[in-house]
Amino acid sequence: MFPISSWYDRLGYHSFPTVFVGLRADQKTALLEAAGRDVVDSPTSSVEKSVAAALQKAIRALPGSCFVGADVCAPTDSPLFAESASVSNGDRAWQMLTSSPKVRQALQQDQTSRLTVRPFRNMNRIREFRLFLYDRELVAMSQMNLERHFKRFARRHDQLWGQGCELATAFRDGLPADHAVVDIYFCSNGDALLVDMNQWGEPTDPLLLRTWDQDWTARPGLKLIAPPLDLSGDVSVSF
Ligand SMILES: Nc1ncnc2c1ncn2[C@@H]1O[C@H](COP(=O)(O)OP(=O)(O)OP(=O)(O)O)[C@@H](O)[C@H]1O
Ligand SMILES: [Mg+2]
């Protein structure tokens, strides 16, 4: 896994501003213990409250509501995340993190010693793409949202690939390894944001590239969902 902190000093300016909240050993233990309980509780002990207070301070340092994570992962599997992915106070951030099995596992396996707080952005998953960088070169790219075909993307195939190549060049020297998988978000103004960086191979999902077991030097290129036989199901995406 590539935690945000492993690339942020070199590539952070391509991404969301991020406030890191380092955890002391006792804070990490408290977070892990709370994450092991079945109920979603507000912080109660003084150590728990110190974590929530640190998160609260970080949230206040950023404009608007926030998106919290554990540096290596985000609490996307928390039941609270399904209600709303954004948090606006430390207690809610604490609850979001402690109710996520992903966060619990990252703490258990000692993959992280810090939390991350980023500005919440209303993202349309249709605009998220995954870049496959092999030997620091873009060899493949996939849509993240695999629900359906989007005609707009098919029309812009070459332009999208060109943008992917430009980003790969911009990220090249800041990558934490020669092979990496980089998730990006195309903003409506055409800019791209680096959202997340993942390790090459399992458990990272190869999405439309289907399998990790292939000759990547053959550069599979941009993969999009093929059009259905009946195009009436297509939706127009502002891009
Ligand atoms: N700052 C943000 N504001 C709003 N949504 C965000 C933000 N950052 C990420 N997201 C959304 O949350 C998703 C998961 O974030 P991220 O990839 O950082 O965590 P993850 O643990 O790797 O999750 P996954 O396993 O789904 O990739 C992103 O694909 C994006 O849709
Ligand atoms: Mg991710």
Image (cartoon, rainbow, N blue to C red):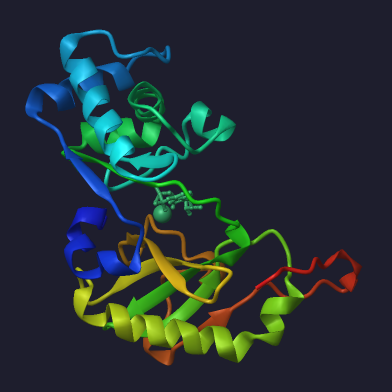
**48 left or right of 25 in image:** right
Where, quadrant-wise, is the N terminus in this rendering?
bottom left
| Front one among 196 and 49 | 49
Inspect this view and state whether residue 216 appears.
no
Q: Quadrant of ligand 2?
A: bottom left
| Looking at the image, residue 96 lies above or below residue 21 | above
Looking at the picture, how far across and down is residue 224, in whole percent? 63, 75
Q: Position of residue 122 (x, y in %)?
A: 55, 51
Of the pair 120 and 27, the residue shown nearer to us? 120
Q: Residue at x 40, y 75 (%)?
A: 132
Residue 198, relative to residue 143: is it above or below? above
**Which residue is outermost to the left?**
25
Where residue 193 appears, x then y in whole percent? 42, 67
- Give left or right: position of 111 versus 234: left
- Residue 41 appears in which quarter of the rendering? top left
Apparent side of residue 127 relative to residue 88 in the rendered image (left or right): right
Q: Quadrant of the C terminus?
A: bottom right
* Residue at the top extreme, as displayed: 44
> What residue is rendered at 17% in x and 27% in y?
28
Residue drawn where x is 20% and y is 54% of the image = 5
Q: Nearer the viewer, residue 74 or 47?
A: 47
Asked if one can make out residue 103 in the rendered structure from this viewpoint, the answer is yes
174 to 23, vertically: above or below: below
Kindly indicate the quadrant of the structure image that contains residue 70: top left
Q: Is residue 99 above or below residue 140?
A: above
Q: Residue at x 29, y 77 (%)?
A: 171
Count all numbered tags in the image, as a single digit: 0
Q: Position of residue 233 (x, y in %)?
A: 86, 64
